[in-house]
Amino acid sequence: MTRHRVNDARLTSFQRLWLSETIRLREEQAGPLEDDEANRLARVAGGSLAERIGQRALLLARRDGQYQALLHWLQGARLAGLLLALLALCSGAGLALAALGDGRQPVNVFWALGSLLGPNLLMLTAWLIGLLLSRDNPGALGRLWLWLSEKLARNASAVQLAPALLLMLQRRRLTRWGLGLMVNALWTLALLAALSTLLLLLATRRYGFVWETTILGGDAFIALTQTLGALPALLGFSLPDAELIRASGDTALSSEAARQHWAGWLVGVVLVYGLLPRLLLTLLCLWRWQSGKSTLQLDPELPSYNLLRPRLLPDSERLGVCDLAPSVLHQPQAGSAGQPGSGSVLVGVELDAGRPWPPLKLTSSVSDAGIIDSREQRRRLLEQLACFPPERLAIACDPRRSPDRGTLALLAELARSAAATRIWLMPPAPGESLDSARLADWHQALDRLQLAYDDAAPLSWLENGHD
């Protein structure tokens, strides 16, 4: 038996798992969904229970809008990330401009260093404390990003996406590493912008450097300057000697060598104690995020998923009503099979027993699927069409009957099992009349489903694909 699996190259395994969690959360909040077709197609696709649950979730998400909502949400998330990145770049450049000024006044080296690295050091300390002590929550920046992503997505079906994402990540304690990746990456961009702006200002303006104090002595500044500059000096950055540091405490030295020593020291300290630690933390969080994300799997033992086991992995097929009707019924939508079909099929839906069947002489290229009257016949035919979708499907209907919701839902489901579908509204038998108002109801209902229909026998279309 050929099995067909619904898949989408645009979604990663992580995103498919995200959709499964979204559908699970939606059903927990709003009650069970109408899922007969999704369960049937998931059973036909085969695989483990987890794979069938994922197939079912993808089918329901495509039907009810969560699939498109996820794509829109991802676009909004990328745009929100871009906005935060631009904000980080502008903030970093602003830090450098505020630290050096316009060059008219001497630059206090430690005041400038505090302006460049002080906010970064405070936020880094807060993040480390939160990493060690707090629970696995998204934090202020994470909530801001989620809020921006949802607002930019502008899709009502995206309501459960953010909560489902957080619940999924919290099981593996990945929220902290995802947030850490975002925070450290943004600070890396900010410090990169600050360092670039710092180099640009130092290359295009002439700055003098001093240090000033009222209660501390010069020896303390000499020791602090040389201690901070020792590690950058190993990478080739300049380190002012004690005499130059002491002389800079009185006034900004006018010599070019003094300015270059202080500028090299400042750039080295910002690089070594600001940019490099943030970059290393970004790489660490990225590694933990990627390794943790690769271990995420759907847990079929969750209560909500365990309830699906009898429907997706049945020991035997049961007839009759299995579940209560959902509180909200979805509007049936027709379509076509996702894979190319072969052959032609003629089937009748709820026809009177007095009508001859088949109503026309069929050639060997057209298969007769009989008349669907019972739920068992419907299930058997749908499973057969799911395994072997036809290229052309003609459905014979009696327009004297009312086009009720159940019949229209069946027509839409059958149409989704074939590459092309046509409804044959059979003319009444001799001596019988047809209500024009009821025929108009059929036309309107089929137009809403976007299904082609005709009053003439579609034999030529079934055999040749054209009239």
Image: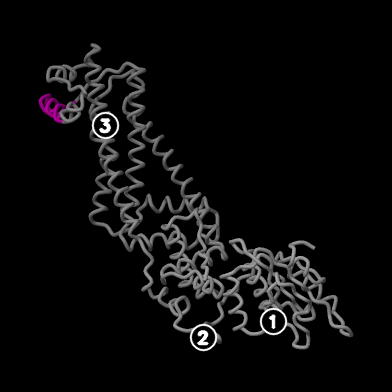
Residue 167: % across, % down: 38, 63
Q: Nearer the viewer, residue 227 or 45?
A: 45
Q: Which amino acid, mark 2?
A: Arg
State yes or no: residue 135 in magenta: no
- The residue that appears at 32% across and 35% down in the rendered structure is 191
- The residue that appears at 32% across and 25% down in the rendered structure is 100
Q: State the separation of the CA atoms marked 3 and 1.
A: 78 Å
- The residue that appears at 49% across and 73% down in the rendered structure is 43
Q: To which residue does mark 3 refer?
A: 271
Left or right of residue 400, residue 59 in this image: left
- Range of magenta residues: 213-227
The disc, 1 or 2, on the residue closer to the chain's N-terminal end is: 2
Q: What main secondary structure does the magenta stretch of the protein show?
A: helix
Left or right of residue 442, residue 338 in this image: left
Which quadrant of the structure image shows residue 96? top left
The disc, 3 or 2, on the residue closer to the chain's N-terminal end is: 3
